[in-house]
Image (spheres, helix red, strand yellow):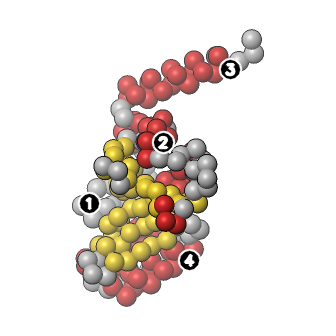
């Protein structure tokens, strides 16, 4: 169960997510994506995890997922973001009109015992899935002024090598993956009938 940022760090690093602390405010991680490109043009999404004590929840945010200032057709972009939020459970979009930031957010209830590790990981996984699913539509809305959310998004097919490289990067490199596999193999031998 996660009650502190240290607990969040342990859960993320234990599952191969590279992360870093931003003082006592949040834990940040970068997750590779397939279709989605961030504002800088990279195929990854930055995610911040923090506890919102006032509302009793863990917040999982992707700040600056989109920049509405770059949209030629802002109204179409906003409509697409609303449709995406309506069709996607748990993920909501937030617009900050003063600076153009569009943020993706998932809130997970934190009980007195904290947030289960599965809840942290599930909440974290929702943002890159949302970004990959909706990026082509949001981009079309921003650039062309229309979108078709009922059509499946077209993403570039990913080669097995690209998938393996992404997994290795997420885990912290090939040596980290090998170490994790050795630990898993050892744990399975230890848990076997004896």
* Residue at the spot of label 2: 7
Q: Earlier in the sequence, mark 2 or mark 4?
A: 2
* Residue at the spot of label 4: 86
Q: Earlier in the sequence, mark 4 or mark 3?
A: 4
Give the CA separation, mark 2 to mark 3: 25 Å
- Relative to 170, residue 146 above or below: below
Near mark 2 (Cα within 10 A), the count class, few <14, some 14-19 or many ≥20, is: some
* Residue at the spot of label 1: 41
Q: Nearer the viewer, mark 4 or mark 3?
A: 3
Near mark 4 (Cα within 10 A), the count class, few <14, some 14-19 or many ≥20, is: few
Residues at circles 4 and 3 in contact by the CB criterion of under 8 Å: no
8 vs 94, nearest the viewer? 8
Tell me where residue 178 appears, x and y as whole percent: 44, 24
Q: Nearer the viewer, mark 2 or mark 1?
A: 2
Residue 142 showing in the rendered view: yes
Q: Secondary structure at mark 4?
A: helix
């Amino acid at each position: 169960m996660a009650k502190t940022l240290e607990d969040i760090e342990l859960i993320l690093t234990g599952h191969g997510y590279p992360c870093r602390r931003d003082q006592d405010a949040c834990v940040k991680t970068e997750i590779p994506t397939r279709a989605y490109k961030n504002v800088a043009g990279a195929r990854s999404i930055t995610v911040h995890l923090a506890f919102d004590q006032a509302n009793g929840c863990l917040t999982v945010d992707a700040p600056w997922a989109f920049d509405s200032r770059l949209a030629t057709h802002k109204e179409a972009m906003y409509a697409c973001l609303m449709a995406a939020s309506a069709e996607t459970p748990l993920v909501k979009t937030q617009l900050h009109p003063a600076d153009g930031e569009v943020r993706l957010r998932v809130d997970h209830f934190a009980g007195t015992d904290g947030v289960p590790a599965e809840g942290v990981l599930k909440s974290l996984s929702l943002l890159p899935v949302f970004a990959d699913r909706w990026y082509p539509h949001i981009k079309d809305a921003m650039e062309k002024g229309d979108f078709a959310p009922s059509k499946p998004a077209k993403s570039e097919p990913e080669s097995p090598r690209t998938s393996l490289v992404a997994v290795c990067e997420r885990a912290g490199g090939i040596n980290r993956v090998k170490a994790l596999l050795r630990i898993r193999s050892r744990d399975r031998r230890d848990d076997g009938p004896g």
